[in-house]
């Protein structure tokens, strides 16, 4: 494998921005308004929950942007953990992603797409898995081509998913007759605990932006463009989430939204735009999910590649191989598709992705703490992007993410223990790989 074959640094700001927005915005923006309203009991508190979730996410993005601008290489969180805490902790963060989190989250999203497609076309439920697996196969094939194709597809799908979002906001602005603020749901009493759970739900809805850091080795001038794409992307996503929520609250009574639950947006689309308009909105939702899948299928294989370059995966020579013509990790992408397909057929990918939350968010906290570690090493002055209002913003990021970790400990102790088990399985593999590759050489580069 010639070392001259390297990842192509060709992604500009628009591509990176589209990947941030497209990876985060899947189906949640269209279905979570009712659940947040049910927990908070009023439209005012529901909007506040969305805003607080967004601000916590923005603090996360600002904090990680400082690290990303200083470590602008392929692999994102895996590389950050290795650089700050050593290769052992880097390996564990990468191991959790490649063996469970990546295929589980892709499988969960694809499975939901399959369900929507079956309902939309009136097909038998047996078509759900084939549609999910087939869609991932097509997206994987696209991302085996040069990275500009996946990036272009991200831009196109992001534009397409913005159309139904803008339509909802526009309708609420000009045709909504309900009170978006000040409305309450009958029979629901406010509580700090329920409000905290609502904020937690919005934080999950904002998740996914961090995956752009896996492409740090393919973004032009990443020390500048990576922080810019993360920060602008999160700000746009916050505005879109608040806009859609306001549009629905302006068009439907709070009690009606509460009664409809996850069907609130579908009901809104049907009444606002008619049967044809409603179907177009549903198509927009499916395109939105496909765009999110594309962002994940483009970014996750880069973790396999980055780990293999450091000989921290079995079959490292294959995983670190880049196709000469396309300069993409074809074997890694194909492996992710195979693993995802197997999970769709054999396990509950929704539950499996939930099991990863405790460990993944614990690694996020460690990365945020890493800002303080790096500043200490550098005498207090970062060499790249500097997070504003330091140290308040990193502290907010740590507290907000810590809220997620503590919630998992309290409400899903089985999932927490299981996720720790996944991590424990990686420890003996780490030491075996060190012995296995000792003294062996093969050309590979990031």
Image (tube, grey):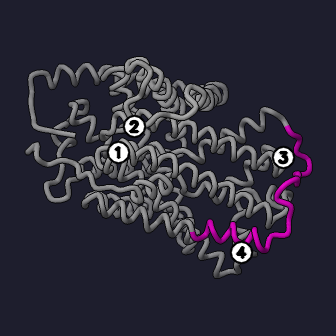
Report the front residue among 410 and 363. 363
Q: Is residue 323 above or below residue 385?
A: below
Residue 233 place in picture, x, y as percent: 51, 52
Residue 102 place in picture, x, y as percent: 41, 43
State the CA–CA distance, disc 1 to disc 2: 8 Å
- Badge 3 density bin: few <14, some 14–19, many ≥20, Cα 10 Å: many
Which residue carries the number 1 mark?
222
Which residue carries the number 4 mark?
270
Query: In the picture provided, is 192 more to the left or to the right than 135?
Result: right
> Do the numbered discs 1 and 2 sit on residues whose CB atoms are within 8 Å?
yes
State the CA–CA distance, disc 3 to disc 2: 39 Å
Which residue carries the number 3 mark?
41
Quarter residue 441 falls in: top left
- Badge 2 density bin: few <14, some 14–19, many ≥20, Cα 10 Å: many
- Badge 4 density bin: few <14, some 14–19, many ≥20, Cα 10 Å: some
Residue pictured at 39% horizontal, 65% vertical = 153
State the CA–CA distance, disc 1 to disc 3: 43 Å
The numbered mark, 4 or 3, whose residue comes first in the sequence reads 3
Q: Nearer the viewer, mark 1 or mark 4?
A: 1
Span colored in magenta: 163-190
The numbered mark, 1 or 4, whose residue comes first in the sequence reads 1
Q: Nearer the viewer, mark 2 or mark 4?
A: 2
Quarter residue 246 falls in: bottom right
The kind of secondary structure element at disc 1 is: helix
Is 361 a magenta residue? no
Q: Which mark is residue 68?
A: 2
> Do the numbered discs 3 and 2 sit on residues whose CB atoms are within 8 Å?
no
Q: Is residue 53 visible?
A: yes
Query: In the picture provided, is 262 more to the left or to the right than 300?
Result: right
Report the front residue among 353 and 365. 365
The numbered mark, 1 or 2, whose residue comes first in the sequence reads 2
């Amino acid at each position: 494998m010639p070392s001259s074959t390297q990842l192509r640094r060709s992604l500009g700001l628009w591509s990176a921005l589209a990947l941030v927005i497209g990876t985060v915005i899947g189906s949640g923006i269209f279905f979570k308004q009712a659940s947040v309203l049910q927990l908070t009991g009023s439209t005012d508190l529901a909007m506040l929950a969305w805003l607080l979730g967004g601000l916590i996410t923005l603090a996360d993005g600002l904090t990680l942007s400082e690290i990303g601008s200083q470590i602008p290489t392929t692999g994102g969180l895996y590389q950050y953990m290795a650089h700050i805490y050593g290769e052992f902790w880097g390996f564990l963060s990468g191991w959790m992603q490649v063996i469970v989190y990546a295929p589980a989250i892709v499988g969960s999203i694809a499975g939901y797409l399959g369900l929507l497609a079956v309902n939309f076309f009136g097909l038998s439920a047996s078509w759900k898995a084939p549609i999910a697996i087939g869609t991932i196969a097509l997206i994987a094939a696209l991302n085996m081509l040069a990275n500009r194709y996946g990036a272009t597809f991200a831009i196109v799908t992001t534009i397409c998913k913005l159309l139904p979002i803008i339509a909802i906001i526009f309708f609420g602005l000009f045709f909504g007759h309900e009170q978006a603020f000040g409305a309450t749901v009958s029979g629901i009493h406010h509580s700090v605990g329920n409000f905290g759970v609502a904020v937690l739900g919005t934080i999950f809805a904002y998740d996914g932006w961090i995956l752009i850091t896996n492409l740090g080795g393919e973004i032009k001038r990443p020390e500048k463009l990576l922080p810019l794409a993360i920060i602008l992307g999160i700000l746009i996503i916050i505005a879109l989430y608040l806009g859609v929520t306001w549009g629905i609250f302006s068009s439907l009574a709070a009690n009606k939204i509460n009664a409809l639950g996850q069907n609130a947006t579908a009901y809104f689309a049907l009444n606002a735009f008619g049967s044809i308009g409603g179907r177009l909105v549903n198509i927009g939702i499916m395109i939105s999910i496909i765009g999110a899948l594309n962002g994940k299928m483009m970014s996750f294989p880069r973790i396999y590649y980055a780990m293999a370059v450091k000989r921290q995966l079995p079959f490292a020579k294959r995983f670190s191989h880049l196709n000469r013509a396309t300069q993409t990790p074809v074997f890694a992408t194909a492996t992710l598709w195979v693993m995802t397909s197997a999970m769709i057929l054999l396990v509950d990918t929704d539950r499996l992705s939930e099991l990863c939350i405790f460990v993944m968010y614990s690694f996020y906290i460690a990365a945020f703490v890493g800002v303080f570690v790096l500043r200490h090493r550098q005498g207090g002055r970062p060499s790249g992007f500097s997070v504003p209002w330091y140290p308040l913003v990193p502290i907010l990021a740590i507290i907000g993410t810590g809220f997620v970790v503590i919630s998992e400990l309290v409400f899903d102790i089985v999932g927490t223990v299981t996720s720790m088990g996944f991590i424990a399985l990686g420890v003996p593999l780490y030491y075996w790989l060190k012995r296995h590759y000792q003294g062996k050489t093969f050309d590979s580069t990031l």
